[in-house]
Amino acid sequence: MRLANQNGRAVLTDGSRAVDIENASNGEFSSDPMAAYAVWNELRSFAASVDWTLAGALEVPALGPCVPRPSAVFGIGLNYRDHAAEAGLDVPSSPMVFTKFPSCIAGPHAEVPLFGDRVDWEAELVVVIGKEADAVDEAEAFDHVAGCCVGQDISDRKAQFKDKPPQFSMGKSRRAYGPIGPWLTSLDEVGDPDDLAITCDVAGERMQQSRTSEMIFPVREIIAFLSSYCVLQPGDLIFTGTPSGVGSVRDPRRYLAVGEAIVTEIEGLGRLENRCIAG
Ligand code: ZN
């Protein structure tokens, strides 16, 4: 099942067509995409029997974030072996966690305002929680996942590293610094979330190319770790970290410029295209 946010309304999509969930269910399900995650299993059952003759064309430019108002957005830092190596940093012994404040969440084609000249890209697999998770172990972690989507953990490095200790959450929470989408793919259709191709192109140049199998802490371990401290709620997002090739550790350093397009893609999950504008 693929769930998208089209003009603020929840729709099922196959990537080219869209079925409005509220209309197709005669009002049984809300038009609010955020409401879908609280009734995830019921929605899955409905989607399995939906009448696709009711579908219209998917309006790609009208797509908003498939999870518009998560209660929490977790970020995992330094979670790829190739990225830890390029940054010259030791592999952490447990996941390094920060938050992206939820108001930074944006759609798959949102414009990204550049505040300053050190704004960077980070292609990431984003996991969406589908059932409350409170101290779950690794074996049951996937029972609490609705699915996955593509994400960009846009980072204002100047704000992030202005002082010591660094301010990860502030540097990563500016307006539209968390594009997600293009839709949520349910876990059964994701394949193995821990082995997907992930890429990021900036202004047509391939900057990141890796696989999620490079992750130091795979998705199950991240969920077990986070839920041992925090109760995860349906619709919560986990940005699972970025592979090598970010601008701040390239030689020479390379940052985003006004007018450039950031294209982020994950195998089977779709692609984001976000254009940089003046902040
Ligand atoms: Zn990140």
Image (cartoon, helix red, strand yellow):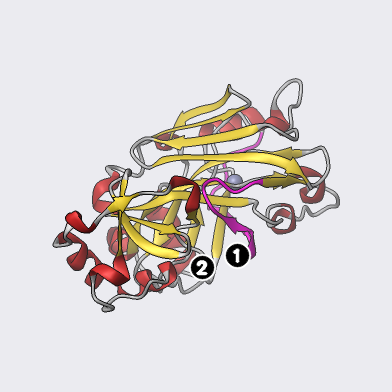
Give the residue at x 74% y 52%: 171
Give the residue at x 38% y 64%: 10
Q: Which residue is under mark 1?
A: 102
Q: Are marks 1 and 2 in contact (CB under 8 Å)?
A: yes
Camera-nearest residue between 225 and 50: 50
Where residue 39 sits in the image (x, y, percent)?
A: 30, 74
Q: Is residue 15 left or right of residue 237?
A: left
At label 2, which amino acid type do we have? Pro
Q: Is residue 234 visible?
A: yes
Question: Between marks 1 and 2, how big is the CA–CA gap?
Answer: 6 Å
Q: Which residue is under mark 2?
A: 70
Where residue 232 sits in the image (x, y, percent)?
A: 45, 70
- The mark that comes first in sequence, 1 or 2, is 2
State whether residue 246 is above or below residue 34. above
Where residue 238 sits in the image (x, y, percent)?
A: 49, 57
At label 1, which amino acid type do we have? Pro
Q: Secondary structure at mark 2?
A: loop
Camera-nearest residue between 68 and 216: 68
Task: Tell me the chief SS of the magenta region.
Answer: loop
The residue segment tinted magenta is 89-111
Identify the image quadrant of the N terminus: bottom left
Where residue 65 sits in the image (x, y, percent)?
A: 50, 57
Mark 1 C-beta to ligand 1 under 8 Å: no
The image quadrant of residue 100 is bottom right
Number of numbered markers: 2
State whether residue 144 is above or below residue 184. below
Q: Is residue 40 visible?
A: no
Q: Residues within 10 Å of mark 2 (few under 14, many from 20)?
A: some
Q: Residues within 10 Å of mark 1 (few under 14, many from 20)?
A: many
Mark 2 C-beta to ligand 1 under 8 Å: no
